[in-house]
Image (cartoon, rainbow, N blue to C red):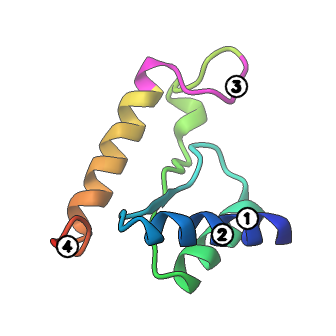
Amino acid sequence: LEQLKRNTAEIIEIVRSEGTDYAMLSYLKSNEPLRKVLVEIAEENDVLYIDLFDEEAGNKGLFTADGFHPNEEGHRVMAEKIYEGLLENESLGESR
């Protein structure tokens, strides 16, 4: 997880150097240690974090047969959560 933190911080730095907005996303499935690290990285770098995790996701049939990748409905749910997260962030997309 420490390597993930370093790599992600480097990616954020590169993206910001290009003047691009950046948002971090979680997974639909729960992975609490990873989620905590992603939240920490987002807070440390003042980056929008959109949590896609849905406790009921497994019960809603949002995944393909492998149980990890989202199916069509899973992608729809993800898109809605991303859209809502972007709308809630007033600073995202402001003119520089």
Residue linked to disc 3: 67
The residue carrying pointer 1 sits among few (fewer than 14), some (14 to 19) or many (20 or more) residues within 10 Å by Cα, namely few
Residue linked to disc 1: 7
Kindly report the distance in space between the C-alpha atoms of the residues bearing marks 4 and 3. 34 Å
Contact between marks 3 and 1 (CB within 8 A): the answer is no
**Lateral position of residue 94 relative to residue 61, left or right:** left
The residue carrying pointer 2 sits among few (fewer than 14), some (14 to 19) or many (20 or more) residues within 10 Å by Cα, namely few
Q: Nearer the viewer, residue 56 or 29?
A: 29
Q: Residue at x 53, y 81 (%)?
A: 45
Residue linked to disc 4: 90
Q: Given the image, on which type of amino acid does mark 2 rest?
A: Glu
Label 4 vs 2, first from the N-terminus: 2
Q: Given the image, on which type of amino acid does mark 4 rest?
A: Glu
**Lateral position of residue 92 relative to residue 22, left or right:** left
Kindly report the distance in space between the C-alpha atoms of the residues bearing marks 3 and 1. 27 Å
Kindly report the distance in space between the C-alpha atoms of the residues bearing marks 4 and 2. 25 Å
Q: Residue at x 59, y 47 (%)?
A: 27
Q: Position of residue 67 (x, y in %)?
A: 70, 25
Label 4 vs 3, first from the N-terminus: 3
Residue linked to disc 2: 10
- Decide: is 78 above or below 6: above
Q: Given the image, on which type of amino acid does mark 1 rest?
A: Asn
Direction right: furthest residue: 2
Direction bottom: furthest residue: 44
Depth-wise, is mark 3 or mark 1 nearer the camera? 1
Q: Is 93 one of the magenta-colored residues? A: no
Label 3 vs 1, first from the N-terminus: 1
Q: Quadrant of residue 1?
A: bottom right
* Numbered mark located on residue 30 in the image: none
